[in-house]
Amino acid sequence: MFFLAAYIAIYRVTGCILCRHHGRDHPIHNRIAAFLSGASYYIYPKYQVFTLAFTKFVEMSWDHWFKTSPQLPEWAVRLDRVPFLHLAYMVGVGYMYHALFFHAHLSPPFNNKALNYCSGNRIENMKRRIVGWMLETEWSKV
């Protein structure tokens, strides 16, 4: 929650200061405000918005390159047929579950609550069973 509050506060304050300083609103003010509001990620680095921002940046860059390039290489045309959104979703969800299961201290509490709520606590039960199974099999050998 702190991350979102800091992000919004920095974004709005920066936008207001720039508009007041220049006497009008300009699209570059939004870009500067968004860039500076990224400092909230530095304040609260466990939040996984950075991952979302990075994946959106890659997706938008790919779309821009594909739409504006007059001549695309053949590998890019072939690669564009791959369903990247589905693959990115699978990788993202897999990473999220991996972080939740094996690195719970790095996973934001919101992530844990959202997954448990949406699954009817099946995720938490599965996590407990897997961790219990891992502890039984590994520690019984020692």
Image: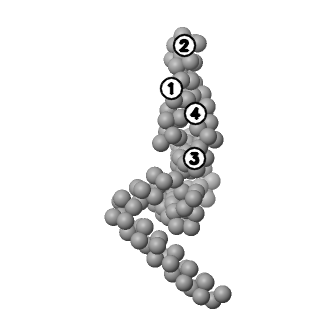
* Residue marked by disc 3: 50
Q: Along the line of sight, which residue is nearer the eye, 72 or 27?
A: 27
Residue at 42% across / 56% down in the picture? 113
- For marks 1 and 3, give the CA distance: 19 Å
Say whether disc 2 or disc 1 marks the residue closer to the N-terminus: 1
Considering every residue shown, the one lying at the far bottom of the view is 141
Local crowd size for mark 1, using a 10 Å CA cut-off: few (<14), some (14–19), many (≥20)? some
Residue 94 seen in the figure: no
Q: Are marks 1 and 3 in contact (CB under 8 Å)?
A: no
Residue at 54% across / 57% down in the picture? 107
* Residue marked by disc 4: 37
Say whether disc 3 or disc 2 marks the residue closer to the N-terminus: 2
Residue 8 locus on image (x, y percent): 50, 32
Say whether disc 1 or disc 3 marks the residue closer to the N-terminus: 1
Where disc 4 sits, the SS reads helix
Say whether disc 4 or disc 1 marks the residue closer to the N-terminus: 1
* Residue marked by disc 1: 12
Q: Along the line of sight, which residue is nearer the eye, 15 or 81?
A: 15
Say whether disc 4 or disc 2 marks the residue closer to the N-terminus: 2
* Residue marked by disc 2: 20
Where disc 2 sits, the SS reads helix
Kind of residue indicated by mark 1: Arg
Q: For the image shown, how many numbered marks are present on the structure?
A: 4
